[in-house]
Amino acid sequence: MKPSSTKRAGWSWWYLLFVVQFAVALWPPFYNKAEPYLFGIPFFYWFQLLWVIVSAVFTAIVYFAVEE
């Protein structure tokens, strides 16, 4: 018989990065403004697009950090 591999299940501190993602996305007063502009695009739009990239990076970090 092969020894069974023990896979750790449970909670990791890395999952707090997901909380950061949702907290920023769900708090519109944080990004509900027009200035500063970036290449003529109001802050409201470019911040959300930037946050998509940041969220993808956070998700990758969590994925590789808790992968066993």
Image (cartoon, rainbow, N blue to C red):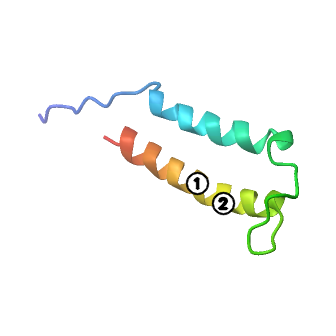
In the picture, the disc for residue 54 is 1
Whole-percent x, y for residue 58 in the image: 52, 48
State the residue at coordinates (40%, 27%).
9
Q: Examine the rendered structure and indicate whether residue 35 appears above or below residue 4.
A: below
Q: Is residue 25 left or right of residue 54?
A: right
Amino acid identity at mark 2: Leu
Q: Examine the rendered structure and indicate whether residue 36 appears above or below residue 26.
A: below
State the residue at coordinates (81%, 48%).
31
Local SS, label 1: helix
Of the 4 image quadrants, the one containing the C terminus is top left
Kindly give the residue lying farthest to the front in the view shown: 36
Decide which of 44, 25 is in the foreground and name it: 44
Local SS, label 2: helix
Q: Are marks 1 and 2 in contact (CB under 8 Å)?
A: yes
Whole-percent x, y for residue 4 in the image: 21, 32
State the residue at coordinates (79%, 40%).
26
**Residue at mark 2:** 50
Amino acid identity at mark 1: Val
How many callouts does the rendering have? 2
Question: In which quarter of the view is residue 36 placed?
Answer: bottom right
Q: Is residue 2 left or right of residue 23?
A: left
Graded by Cα atoms within 10 Å as few (under 14), some (14 to 19) or many (20 or more), the crowding at tag 1 reads few
Whole-percent x, y for residue 56 in the image: 56, 56
Q: CA distance from mark 1 to mark 2?
A: 6 Å
In the picture, the disc for residue 64 is none
Whole-percent x, y for residue 51 in the image: 66, 55
Of the 4 image quadrants, the one containing the N terminus is top left
Q: Examine the rendered structure and indicate whether residue 67 appears above or below residue 39.
A: above
Kindly give the residue lying farthest to the left in the view shown: 1
Graded by Cα atoms within 10 Å as few (under 14), some (14 to 19) or many (20 or more), the crowding at tag 2 reads few
Kindly give the residue lying farthest to the bottom in the view shown: 39
